[in-house]
Amino acid sequence: MLLLTEISQLKCAHMGLAVVGDVSQSFVRIAGARVAVSQDPSGKPVVACPMTAPKPCTTTRRMQTGHSQLVYINGKPACLSSVFGLTDYPAPYTLFNANQVFVESSS
């Protein structure tokens, strides 16, 4: 599984997109992009969700799975490409594109 970074993209079940964006650590980078840890993918805006009723997905919520059990940065688990959580819809979100192919980890 690939590690997520601040430029990794997530998607809701309806193909709306979210970027991990701002992350809570600045120690470890992959190709210049900071690695996401703990709950960094949570609370990100979802754009272009085509769902209209009852409402579109607009925000990612707490990550449920996808934390590394092996890689920790400053005491927090790194986020993996197996990321899974719910949006505010509540539809699930998963990885769309890690935007890096250099660093992998098993769970």
Image: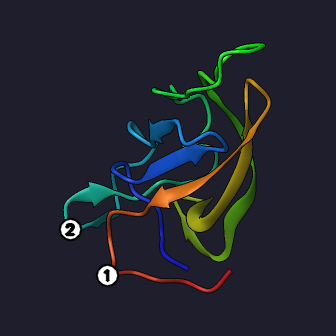
Residue at point 74% right, 15% down?
Answer: 53
Residues at discs 2 and 1 in contact (Cβ within 8 Å): yes
Question: Residue 45, relative to residue 82: is it above or below?
Answer: above
Q: Secondary structure at mark 2?
A: loop
Residue at point 58%, 67% (across, down): 80
Residue 31 numbered tag: 2
Residue at 62%, 39% (x, y): give it.
14
Left or right relative to 24: residue 94: right
Q: Could you tell me the amino acid type at mark 1?
A: Phe
Taking depth in this image into account, of 101 and 93 the one nearest to the observer is 93
Left or right, residue 64 beside residue 73: right
Point out which mark residue 102 bears.
Answer: 1
Residue located 56% across and 80% down the image: 1
Q: 73 above or below 25?
A: below
Does label 2 or label 1 sit earlier along the sequence? 2
Q: Label 2 to label 1, Cα distance in Å?
A: 8 Å
Question: Mark 2 packing: few (<14 Cα in 10 Å), some, or many (20+)?
Answer: few
Question: Horizontal and vertical percent for residue 96?
Answer: 49, 57
Residue 81: x and y, percent?
56, 67
What is the quadrant of residue 83 in the picture? bottom right
Q: Is residue 86 above or below residue 46?
A: below
Tag count in the figure? 2
Q: Which corner quadrant holds the C terminus?
A: bottom right
